[in-house]
Image (cartoon, grey):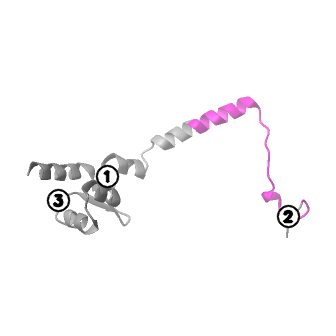
Amino acid sequence: MKPNKSNQKKEDAPVLYIIPAVQYEAFAHKLEIIHEWVLNSKSPKNIIAEGWLTENEAKETLGKGTTSLWALRKSNAIKSSKIGGKTYYCVDSIKQYLEKGASK
C-alpha cells in the first residue's frame, strides 16, 4: 500500500526547519570543531596507525605469509599484541628485524 497523506505516519514525514542564518552559521562552526576533534582523536585506528600494523600490513611489509608471520611472532623475533581476536605487530620491532637481516 502506497503511503498518502491520510495513512503516512507522522514520524515518517519529512520535516523542514527554518532558522536564522546566524544560528545556522554557529551550528555549522560547532559541527566543524566536532569533526576536527573526531579526526584528530586517539581512536583505536589512529593509535594502531602510530606504531602498529595489522596482520595483513605486516605480511605485506615483510613479504611473508601467514605461517611465516606466526613463526616470527612465536619465536619473539617481532613483537605483537592481540586485541579482540586481531593481532597487531609493532612497527619498531619489524624495523629491527629487517635491520638485523640486512646486516647479515
User: Which residue occupies the foreground of this view, 60 or 69?
Assistant: 60
Instruction: Assess whether mark 2 and mark 3 are in contact (beta carbons under 8 angstroms).
Output: no
Disc 1 marks which amino acid?
Answer: Trp
Task: Looking at the image, tell me whether mark 2 or mark 1 is earlier in sequence order.
Answer: 2
Disc 3 marks which amino acid?
Answer: Ala
Residue furthest right in the image: 6
Disc 2 marks which amino acid?
Answer: Pro
- The residues colored magenta run 5-32
User: Residue beneath label 1, please?
Assistant: 52
Quadrant in the rendering for residue 68: bottom left
User: Which residue occupies the foreground of this view, 1 or 80?
Assistant: 1
Instruction: Assess whether mark 3 and mark 1 are in contact (beta carbons under 8 angstroms).
Output: no
For label 3, the SS is loop
User: Residue beneath label 3, please?
Assistant: 77
Is 10 drawn above or below residue 66 in the view shown?
Answer: above
Residue furthest left in the image: 104
Look at 25% across and 69% down and name the residue there: 67
Q: CA distance from mark 1 to mark 3?
A: 15 Å
Q: CA distance from mark 3 to mark 2?
A: 64 Å
Residue furthest front in the image: 63
For label 1, the SS is strand
Residue 24 image position (x, y, % from top left): 70, 34
User: Residue beneath label 2, please?
Assistant: 3
Task: Looking at the image, tell me whether mark 3 or mark 2 is earlier in sequence order.
Answer: 2
**Dot 2 surroundings within 10 Å: few (below 14), some, or many (20 or more)?**
few
Q: Which mark is residue 74?
A: none
Is 61 drawn above or below residue 25 in the view shown?
Answer: below
Task: Looking at the image, tell me whether mark 1 or mark 3 is earlier in sequence order.
Answer: 1
Look at 50% across and 40% down and name the residue there: 37
Q: Magenta includes 18?
A: yes
